[in-house]
Image: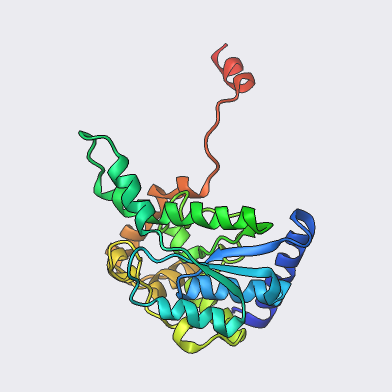
Amino acid sequence: MFDVQKTTQACVQWIRDFFEENGPGCNAVLGISGGKDSSVAAALCVEALGKDRVIGVLMPNGEQHDIDMAHLLCEHLGIENYVVNIHDAVEGLKNAIPAGLELSTQSLTNLPPRIRMATVYAVSQSRNGRVVNTCNLSEDWVGYSTRYGDAAGDFSPMSHLTVQEVKAVGRYLGLPEVLVEKVPIDGLCGKTDEDNLGFTYAVLDRYIRTGEIEDPETKERIDRLHKRNLFKLQLMPSFDPEIETKAAE
């Protein structure tokens, strides 16, 4: 039922409208990993704004074995880009933690994506930009993102598109197949996304769109992840004295 032409054209117009309302003449700035999400997000912005208003930020953490894919995307789209190696920043922050405070494995895992987002915002604010969120619906559904890391941004063109739909948009926009079908690796612990999740995106996407799933254990796992990670998609809870004082009366 997915109409890739209609959806892509509507998304492109939505991006144009966003910039018209939130920064006429501003640039779209995003982190470029070489994976499908950043590739499709960048291509959508180029289609909406033109290549001269899209800026990519490549952020290896030391050595990145597949950074050639990020360069391929930038060359294919013809967009300006910067390479900022975050290794020293990551190590500097880790070394600045006081002795006696041992960072948890999760903290260490999420540190690089949060530093990457700080880097993207530094570039964006220096280049009259608006930061592109590159998350998709499938990853958001099960919380497969880092809060205040890759989950951040000023606007999100793909957060209501599943992985399969994002790929379709990428093909429609003429991206090289190697970028569209690149096996997603989380960039955190070196495993593929699907290895970490314990199920395929194809299974997840079908369940999201149709509610159909064969394996009850996989269904239970998806439902549990979705419920546990809903907070990532919600605004920060805030105390409202007017409401709370009335409730206490």
Quadrant assignment for the N terminus: bottom right
Say if residue 218 shows up in the picture. yes
Residue furthest top in the image: 249
Near-viewer residue (224 or 37): 37
Q: How is the image coloured?
A: rainbow
- The structure residue drawn at horizontal position 55% and vertical position 78%, both measured from the top left corner, is 74
Residue furthest left in the image: 100
Q: Quadrant of residue 77?
A: bottom right
Residue 51: x and y, percent?
68, 76
- The structure residue drawn at horizontal position 28% and vertical position 63%, both measured from the top left corner, is 189
- The structure residue drawn at horizontal position 45% and vertical position 57%, both measured from the top left corner, is 116
Residue 128 located left or right of residue 238: right
Figure check: 135 above or below 164: above
Figure check: 57 above or below 176: above
Near-viewer residue (144 or 107): 107
Say if residue 151 shows up in the picture. no
Total numbered circles = 0
- The structure residue drawn at horizontal position 32% and vertical position 61%, both measured from the top left corner, is 188
Figure check: 209 above or below 237: below
Residue 134: x and y, percent?
53, 64
Residue 225: x and y, percent?
36, 54
Q: Quadrant of residue 153?
A: bottom right
Quadrant assignment for the C terminus: top right
Near-viewer residue (66 or 150): 66
Residue 216: x and y, percent?
30, 64
Figure check: 88 above or below 168: above
